[in-house]
């Protein structure tokens, strides 16, 4: 029986109350503070001031715990709007906000579909918004938006982590490596790249995400109405 369907142990008198929800919320807090490497049943038990073996009545494996953590974050992703474009935009933006709140979430999405109740509710909202679209196109459309969002947020989180690891923000990194690029551009081997780096507007992450998503949705609109 999957963890979503498996009942919790019966309540019993204990010095510290315990539930699957409390365990998962504690795990999310630990991951938010120090990343997934900080999450273990032993550390969760210590944070809750209970013996580690008590947790196994609620969660069998670390994989189950991660699935529950991912589904807990999916509860924060509730797409809204009228029509497929508004709903897909809402879903993309809500997912990005969730990743910014929970960096570790970016590492656990993008594989096989999540089957927890909150993830299913998010999927239902997206599928319902695409009602009327050719049924054979619904999954490719949803997958394309997911792929864009996951790629974008992973790039943003990678930048955050690089800043922490190097102690340099993006502007400091550019200043450090700028002279190297000037020397490489002076060879004349990269004229198109030089033009873009020198002349194009350097948009922030919010603008870059919004514009890219808009172009993707424009393409989807042209495709499903053609």
Image (tube, grey):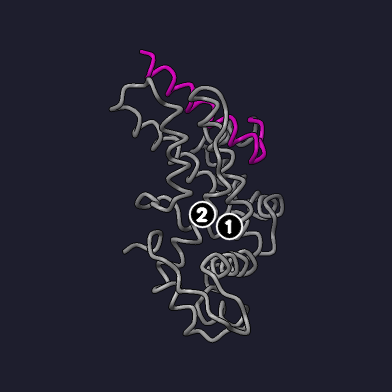
Q: In the image shown, does 99 or 79 lie closer to the viewer?
A: 79
Residue 50: image location, x then y, percent: 58, 84
Q: Residue at x 55, y 31 (%)?
A: 89
Residue 21: image location, x then y, percent: 55, 64
Tag 1 near tag 2, CB within 8 Å: yes
Residue 137: image location, x then y, percent: 32, 27
**In this picture, is 93 found above or below 111?**
above
Q: In the image shown, does 1 or 194 lie closer to the viewer?
A: 1
Q: Residue at x 54, y 60 (%)?
A: 104
Q: Which residue is mark 2?
A: 106
The numbered mark at residue 138 is none
Quadrant that contains the C terminus:
top left
Q: Which residue is mark 1?
A: 103
Magenta region includes residue 60: no
Quadrant that contains the N terminus:
bottom left
Bounds of the magenta span? 200-226
Q: In the image shown, does 219 or 82 lie closer to the viewer?
A: 82
**In this picture, is 191 found above or below 177?**
above
Place residue 94 in its image quadrant: top right
Q: Disc 1 on helix, strand or loop? A: helix
| Mark 1 surroundings: few (<14), some (14-19) or many (≥20) residues within 10 A | many
Magenta stretch, overall SS: helix
Q: Is residue 17 left or right of residue 221?
A: right
Q: Residue at x 52, y 75 (%)?
A: 11
Q: Disc 2 on helix, strand or loop? A: helix
């Amino acid at each position: 029986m999957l963890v979503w369907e498996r009942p919790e142990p019966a309540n019993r008198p204990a010095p510290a109350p315990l539930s699957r929800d409390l365990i998962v919320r504690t795990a999310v807090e630990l991951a938010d503070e120090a990343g997934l490497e900080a999450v273990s049943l032993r550390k969760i038990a210590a944070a809750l001031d209970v013996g580690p073996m008590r947790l196994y009545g609620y969660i069998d494996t670390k994989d189950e715990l991660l699935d529950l953590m991912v589904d807990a974050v999916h509860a924060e992703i509730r797409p809204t709007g009228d029509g497929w474009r508004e709903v897909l935009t809402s879903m993309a933006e809500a997912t990005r906000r969730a990743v910014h709140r929970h960096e570790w979430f970016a590492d656990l999405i993008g594989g096989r579909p999540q089957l927890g109740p909150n993830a299913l509710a998010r999927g239902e909202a997206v599928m319902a918004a695409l009602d009327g679209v050719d049924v054979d196109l619904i999954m490719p459309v949803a997958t394309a938006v997911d792929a864009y969002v996951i790629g974008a947020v992973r790039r943003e989180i990678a930048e955050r982590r690089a800043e922490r690891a190097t102690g340099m923000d993006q502007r400091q990194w550019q200043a450090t490596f700028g002279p190297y690029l000037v020397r490489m551009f002076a060879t004349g081997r990269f004229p198109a790249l030089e033009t873009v780096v020198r002349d194009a507007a350097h948009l922030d992450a919010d603008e870059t995400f919004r514009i890219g998503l808009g172009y993707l949705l424009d393409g989807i609109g042209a495709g499903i109405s053609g």
